[in-house]
Image (cartoon, rainbow, N blue to C red):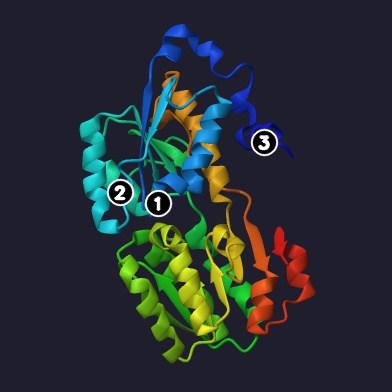
Amino acid sequence: MNNRRKLIVVLGAGASGLPFAGGGAQQARRLRQVGLLWIESDPSSSRYVAALREGLGAYGYVEGKNVHVDDRFLVDRYELLADGAARLVAQNVDIVVCWGATALQAISKATSTIPIVMVSSGDPVKLGVAESLSRPGRNITGTASLSQELSGKSLELLTEIVPALRRLAVVLYPDSTAEVRALKNYEAAARPLNIEVQPVEIRTPSDIGPVIAEIAHMKVQAVAVVGSTLLTANSHQVLAAVDKIRLPAIYSNLAFARSGGLMAYAANLSEHFLRAATYIDKIFKGAKPGDLPIEQPTRVELVINLKTAKALGLAIPHSLTMRAAEVIE
Protein backbone atom coordinates (compact mmCIF):
# COMPACT_ATOMS: atom_id res chain seq x y z
CA MET A 1 0.00 0.00 0.00
CA ASN A 2 1.52 3.32 -0.98
CA ASN A 3 1.85 6.18 1.54
CA ARG A 4 -1.14 8.11 0.21
CA ARG A 5 -3.47 5.12 0.45
CA LYS A 6 -2.12 4.24 3.90
CA LEU A 7 -2.90 7.71 5.20
CA ILE A 8 -6.41 7.58 3.76
CA VAL A 9 -7.03 4.28 5.57
CA VAL A 10 -5.66 5.52 8.90
CA LEU A 11 -7.09 9.01 8.92
CA GLY A 12 -10.48 8.02 7.55
CA ALA A 13 -13.34 10.31 6.70
CA GLY A 14 -11.85 13.28 8.54
CA ALA A 15 -9.51 13.86 5.62
CA SER A 16 -12.22 14.22 2.99
CA GLY A 17 -11.93 16.84 0.27
CA LEU A 18 -8.98 19.16 -0.09
CA PRO A 19 -7.84 19.08 3.53
CA PHE A 20 -6.16 22.41 4.02
CA ALA A 21 -7.39 24.59 1.21
CA GLY A 22 -10.77 24.88 2.91
CA GLY A 23 -9.13 26.78 5.78
CA GLY A 24 -8.53 29.84 3.60
CA ALA A 25 -5.48 31.93 2.88
CA GLN A 26 -5.42 33.52 6.32
CA GLN A 27 -5.11 30.12 8.02
CA ALA A 28 -2.42 29.04 5.55
CA ARG A 29 -0.29 32.09 6.36
CA ARG A 30 -0.23 31.50 10.09
CA LEU A 31 2.52 29.32 11.52
CA ARG A 32 0.67 27.15 14.03
CA GLN A 33 2.67 25.91 17.01
CA VAL A 34 2.32 22.25 18.06
CA GLY A 35 4.32 21.46 21.20
CA LEU A 36 5.26 17.87 22.06
CA LEU A 37 5.56 16.34 25.52
CA TRP A 38 6.74 12.82 26.28
CA ILE A 39 9.92 10.87 27.00
CA GLU A 40 12.18 10.60 23.97
CA SER A 41 15.89 9.89 23.95
CA ASP A 42 16.51 11.31 20.45
CA PRO A 43 13.73 13.56 19.06
CA SER A 44 15.54 13.98 15.74
CA SER A 45 15.15 10.28 14.93
CA SER A 46 11.79 9.67 16.61
CA ARG A 47 9.46 7.51 14.50
CA TYR A 48 6.51 9.05 16.33
CA VAL A 49 7.43 12.68 15.61
CA ALA A 50 7.83 11.61 11.97
CA ALA A 51 4.42 9.90 12.00
CA LEU A 52 2.77 13.01 13.43
CA ARG A 53 4.35 15.20 10.74
CA GLU A 54 3.24 12.70 8.09
CA GLY A 55 -0.31 12.85 9.41
CA LEU A 56 -0.32 16.64 9.44
CA GLY A 57 0.97 16.62 5.88
CA ALA A 58 -2.17 14.75 4.79
CA TYR A 59 -4.15 17.80 5.88
CA GLY A 60 -1.86 20.25 4.11
CA TYR A 61 0.15 21.32 7.16
CA VAL A 62 3.77 21.72 6.09
CA GLU A 63 6.60 22.19 8.57
CA GLY A 64 7.91 25.74 8.42
CA LYS A 65 5.14 26.99 6.13
CA ASN A 66 1.94 26.81 8.16
CA VAL A 67 2.90 24.68 11.16
CA HIS A 68 5.84 24.16 13.48
CA VAL A 69 6.09 20.87 15.39
CA ASP A 70 8.24 21.82 18.38
CA ASP A 71 10.15 18.92 19.93
CA ARG A 72 12.24 21.04 22.33
CA PHE A 73 10.08 20.03 25.29
CA LEU A 74 10.63 16.28 24.95
CA VAL A 75 12.58 14.94 27.92
CA ASP A 76 14.53 11.79 28.76
CA ARG A 77 13.23 11.11 32.27
CA TYR A 78 9.85 11.05 33.97
CA GLU A 79 10.82 13.58 36.62
CA LEU A 80 11.45 16.20 33.91
CA LEU A 81 7.93 16.03 32.46
CA ALA A 82 6.51 18.65 34.84
CA ASP A 83 9.24 21.09 33.86
CA GLY A 84 8.65 20.37 30.17
CA ALA A 85 4.94 21.02 30.66
CA ALA A 86 5.63 24.34 32.40
CA ARG A 87 7.93 25.44 29.55
CA LEU A 88 5.30 24.49 26.98
CA VAL A 89 2.71 26.64 28.72
CA ALA A 90 5.16 29.55 28.95
CA GLN A 91 5.77 29.20 25.21
CA ASN A 92 1.99 29.53 24.69
CA VAL A 93 1.80 26.93 21.92
CA ASP A 94 -1.46 26.45 20.04
CA ILE A 95 -1.77 22.73 20.84
CA VAL A 96 0.10 20.20 22.98
CA VAL A 97 0.47 16.60 21.81
CA CYS A 98 1.39 14.28 24.67
CA TRP A 99 2.09 10.56 24.80
CA GLY A 100 1.78 8.49 27.96
CA ALA A 101 -0.28 8.79 31.12
CA THR A 102 2.42 10.54 33.15
CA ALA A 103 2.93 13.19 30.45
CA LEU A 104 -0.84 13.68 30.23
CA GLN A 105 -1.09 14.24 33.96
CA ALA A 106 1.82 16.71 33.87
CA ILE A 107 0.40 18.87 31.08
CA SER A 108 -3.18 18.72 32.39
CA LYS A 109 -1.94 20.13 35.69
CA ALA A 110 0.02 22.85 33.90
CA THR A 111 -2.81 24.22 31.73
CA SER A 112 -6.59 24.18 31.55
CA THR A 113 -6.79 26.34 28.43
CA ILE A 114 -4.27 25.13 25.82
CA PRO A 115 -5.84 22.26 23.80
CA ILE A 116 -4.25 18.89 24.55
CA VAL A 117 -4.28 15.99 22.09
CA MET A 118 -3.22 12.86 23.93
CA VAL A 119 -1.80 9.81 22.17
CA SER A 120 -2.19 6.41 23.84
CA SER A 121 -2.18 8.04 27.26
CA GLY A 122 -3.93 5.58 29.53
CA ASP A 123 -7.54 5.95 30.62
CA PRO A 124 -8.13 9.71 30.99
CA VAL A 125 -11.34 9.20 32.95
CA LYS A 126 -9.65 7.03 35.58
CA LEU A 127 -6.74 9.49 35.61
CA GLY A 128 -9.25 12.24 36.46
CA VAL A 129 -8.49 14.49 33.48
CA ALA A 130 -11.63 13.81 31.38
CA GLU A 131 -15.30 13.61 32.27
CA SER A 132 -16.02 10.77 29.84
CA LEU A 133 -14.61 9.27 26.66
CA SER A 134 -17.60 10.35 24.57
CA ARG A 135 -17.50 13.94 25.80
CA PRO A 136 -14.23 14.59 27.64
CA GLY A 137 -14.94 18.25 28.49
CA ARG A 138 -12.11 20.50 29.61
CA ASN A 139 -9.28 20.94 27.11
CA ILE A 140 -8.35 17.30 26.37
CA THR A 141 -9.08 14.85 23.56
CA GLY A 142 -7.20 12.22 21.52
CA THR A 143 -6.69 8.47 21.79
CA ALA A 144 -6.72 6.40 24.97
CA SER A 145 -4.55 3.36 25.56
CA LEU A 146 -5.55 -0.24 26.13
CA SER A 147 -2.00 -1.40 26.89
CA GLN A 148 -2.70 -1.90 30.59
CA GLU A 149 -5.70 -4.07 29.72
CA LEU A 150 -3.69 -6.37 27.45
CA SER A 151 -1.71 -7.95 30.28
CA GLY A 152 -3.90 -11.05 30.48
CA LYS A 153 -3.63 -11.76 26.77
CA SER A 154 0.13 -11.10 26.82
CA LEU A 155 0.51 -13.63 29.63
CA GLU A 156 -1.54 -16.15 27.66
CA LEU A 157 0.76 -15.67 24.65
CA LEU A 158 3.81 -16.24 26.84
CA THR A 159 2.42 -19.48 28.22
CA GLU A 160 1.98 -20.80 24.68
CA ILE A 161 5.73 -20.40 24.20
CA VAL A 162 6.73 -21.32 27.76
CA PRO A 163 4.16 -23.89 28.95
CA ALA A 164 6.10 -24.47 32.19
CA LEU A 165 5.94 -20.78 33.13
CA ARG A 166 5.64 -20.46 36.91
CA ARG A 167 7.45 -17.20 37.66
CA LEU A 168 7.29 -14.03 35.56
CA ALA A 169 9.32 -10.81 35.82
CA VAL A 170 7.34 -7.65 34.93
CA VAL A 171 9.46 -4.61 34.09
CA LEU A 172 7.94 -1.17 34.77
CA TYR A 173 8.43 2.36 36.03
CA PRO A 174 6.77 2.16 39.47
CA ASP A 175 5.57 5.77 39.75
CA SER A 176 3.42 5.59 36.60
CA THR A 177 -0.27 5.05 37.36
CA ALA A 178 -0.81 3.25 34.06
CA GLU A 179 2.22 0.99 34.45
CA VAL A 180 1.26 -0.01 37.98
CA ARG A 181 -2.20 -0.85 36.67
CA ALA A 182 -0.63 -3.05 33.99
CA LEU A 183 1.34 -4.82 36.72
CA LYS A 184 -1.82 -5.43 38.76
CA ASN A 185 -3.52 -6.83 35.66
CA TYR A 186 -0.62 -9.23 35.16
CA GLU A 187 -0.95 -10.30 38.79
CA ALA A 188 -4.69 -10.85 38.42
CA ALA A 189 -4.24 -12.90 35.24
CA ALA A 190 -1.40 -14.93 36.75
CA ARG A 191 -3.19 -15.88 39.96
CA PRO A 192 -5.53 -18.58 38.56
CA LEU A 193 -2.62 -20.00 36.57
CA ASN A 194 -0.47 -20.35 39.71
CA ILE A 195 2.15 -18.05 38.17
CA GLU A 196 4.07 -15.76 40.50
CA VAL A 197 4.70 -12.21 39.26
CA GLN A 198 7.89 -10.45 40.30
CA PRO A 199 7.96 -6.65 39.70
CA VAL A 200 11.21 -5.23 38.33
CA GLU A 201 11.42 -1.46 38.81
CA ILE A 202 13.23 0.85 36.38
CA ARG A 203 13.39 4.54 37.35
CA THR A 204 16.09 6.00 35.09
CA PRO A 205 17.85 4.99 31.86
CA SER A 206 20.95 4.15 33.88
CA ASP A 207 18.92 1.53 35.78
CA ILE A 208 18.09 -0.48 32.68
CA GLY A 209 21.25 -2.55 32.26
CA PRO A 210 22.02 -3.45 35.89
CA VAL A 211 18.41 -3.93 37.00
CA ILE A 212 17.47 -6.20 34.11
CA ALA A 213 20.72 -8.12 34.63
CA GLU A 214 19.46 -9.00 38.12
CA ILE A 215 16.49 -10.84 36.56
CA ALA A 216 18.91 -13.66 35.70
CA HIS A 217 19.15 -14.42 39.44
CA MET A 218 15.40 -14.29 40.13
CA LYS A 219 14.55 -17.82 38.92
CA VAL A 220 11.96 -16.55 36.44
CA GLN A 221 11.16 -18.27 33.15
CA ALA A 222 10.01 -15.21 31.17
CA VAL A 223 9.87 -11.42 31.13
CA ALA A 224 7.06 -8.95 30.34
CA VAL A 225 7.89 -5.30 29.62
CA VAL A 226 4.84 -3.07 30.13
CA GLY A 227 3.88 -0.12 27.94
CA SER A 228 6.28 2.60 29.08
CA THR A 229 7.48 5.76 27.34
CA LEU A 230 10.75 5.59 29.32
CA LEU A 231 11.45 2.01 28.24
CA THR A 232 10.35 2.67 24.66
CA ALA A 233 12.63 5.71 24.42
CA ASN A 234 15.50 3.48 25.55
CA SER A 235 14.41 0.36 23.70
CA HIS A 236 17.89 -0.50 22.42
CA GLN A 237 19.20 -0.61 25.99
CA VAL A 238 16.25 -2.72 27.11
CA LEU A 239 16.64 -5.18 24.24
CA ALA A 240 20.39 -5.50 24.80
CA ALA A 241 19.87 -6.13 28.52
CA VAL A 242 17.12 -8.73 27.95
CA ASP A 243 19.25 -10.42 25.28
CA LYS A 244 22.02 -10.94 27.84
CA ILE A 245 19.79 -12.78 30.31
CA ARG A 246 18.58 -15.18 27.58
CA LEU A 247 14.92 -15.28 28.58
CA PRO A 248 11.78 -15.09 26.40
CA ALA A 249 10.12 -11.69 26.65
CA ILE A 250 6.94 -10.00 25.49
CA TYR A 251 6.67 -6.23 24.99
CA SER A 252 3.80 -3.74 24.91
CA ASN A 253 5.17 -1.82 21.92
CA LEU A 254 5.48 -3.35 18.45
CA ALA A 255 8.78 -1.58 17.78
CA PHE A 256 10.53 -3.87 20.28
CA ALA A 257 9.81 -7.04 18.30
CA ARG A 258 10.75 -5.34 15.05
CA SER A 259 14.09 -4.36 16.60
CA GLY A 260 14.99 -7.80 17.92
CA GLY A 261 12.63 -8.57 20.80
CA LEU A 262 10.94 -11.97 20.79
CA MET A 263 7.31 -10.90 20.75
CA ALA A 264 5.11 -7.80 21.07
CA TYR A 265 1.37 -7.46 21.54
CA ALA A 266 0.01 -3.93 21.25
CA ALA A 267 -1.83 -1.34 19.22
CA ASN A 268 0.14 0.29 16.42
CA LEU A 269 1.42 3.46 18.07
CA SER A 270 2.49 5.09 14.81
CA GLU A 271 -1.13 4.91 13.67
CA HIS A 272 -2.16 6.73 16.85
CA PHE A 273 0.22 9.56 16.01
CA LEU A 274 -1.17 9.69 12.47
CA ARG A 275 -4.64 9.85 13.99
CA ALA A 276 -3.59 12.74 16.25
CA ALA A 277 -3.34 14.89 13.12
CA THR A 278 -7.11 14.53 12.64
CA TYR A 279 -7.73 16.05 16.07
CA ILE A 280 -5.21 18.82 15.49
CA ASP A 281 -6.85 19.76 12.19
CA LYS A 282 -10.32 19.88 13.76
CA ILE A 283 -9.11 22.06 16.63
CA PHE A 284 -7.26 24.41 14.27
CA LYS A 285 -10.54 24.77 12.37
CA GLY A 286 -12.48 25.77 15.47
CA ALA A 287 -13.55 22.58 17.26
CA LYS A 288 -13.33 22.50 21.06
CA PRO A 289 -11.22 19.58 22.30
CA GLY A 290 -13.70 18.80 25.07
CA ASP A 291 -16.39 18.17 22.43
CA LEU A 292 -14.30 15.66 20.46
CA PRO A 293 -14.75 12.04 21.65
CA ILE A 294 -11.66 10.22 22.88
CA GLU A 295 -11.04 7.11 20.80
CA GLN A 296 -9.84 3.72 21.99
CA PRO A 297 -7.87 1.40 19.71
CA THR A 298 -9.93 -1.43 18.27
CA ARG A 299 -7.05 -3.21 16.54
CA VAL A 300 -4.25 -4.90 18.45
CA GLU A 301 -1.38 -6.61 16.65
CA LEU A 302 0.92 -9.50 17.48
CA VAL A 303 4.46 -9.36 16.08
CA ILE A 304 6.78 -12.36 16.48
CA ASN A 305 10.50 -12.37 15.77
CA LEU A 306 11.49 -15.88 14.70
CA LYS A 307 15.17 -14.89 14.48
CA THR A 308 15.15 -14.20 18.19
CA ALA A 309 13.16 -17.34 18.92
CA LYS A 310 15.79 -19.42 17.08
CA ALA A 311 18.61 -17.71 18.98
CA LEU A 312 16.86 -18.61 22.25
CA GLY A 313 16.21 -22.19 21.14
CA LEU A 314 12.45 -21.70 21.28
CA ALA A 315 9.92 -23.43 19.07
CA ILE A 316 7.06 -21.07 18.24
CA PRO A 317 3.79 -22.97 17.70
CA HIS A 318 2.43 -22.69 14.17
CA SER A 319 -0.95 -21.75 15.64
CA LEU A 320 0.71 -18.67 17.17
CA THR A 321 2.49 -17.50 14.02
CA MET A 322 -0.77 -17.86 12.11
CA ARG A 323 -2.38 -15.32 14.45
CA ALA A 324 0.45 -12.82 14.13
CA ALA A 325 0.04 -9.68 12.07
CA GLU A 326 3.77 -9.80 11.33
CA VAL A 327 6.35 -12.56 11.55
CA ILE A 328 10.00 -11.57 11.26
CA GLU A 329 12.18 -14.34 9.81
Q: Is residue 277 above or below residue 254?
A: above
Residue 151 percent location from the top left of the image: 52, 68
Residue 148 or residue 227, whichever sits in front: 227
Residue 263 or residue 239, whichever sits in front: 239
Residue 68 percent location from the top left of the image: 39, 28
Q: What amino acid does circle 2 point to? A: Gln
- The reply to whether dot 1 and dot 3 touch (C-beta < 8 Å) is no
Q: Estimate the spatial distance between the alpha carbons at disc 3 and disc 2, rounded to whole Å.
A: 34 Å
Please rate how many residues cluster around mark 1, counting C-alpha atoms within 10 Å: few if below 14, some from 14 to 19, many from 20: some
For mark 2, give the secondary structure: helix
Q: Quadrant of residue 325?
A: bottom right
Which of the labelled discs sits on residue 42, or is there none?
Answer: 1
Q: Which residue extends farthest front? A: 44
Which residue in the structure is indicated by mark 3? 3
Q: Estimate the spatial distance between the alpha carbons at disc 1 and disc 3, rounded to whole Å.
A: 24 Å
Q: Image point 57% across, 48% down: which residue?
A: 297
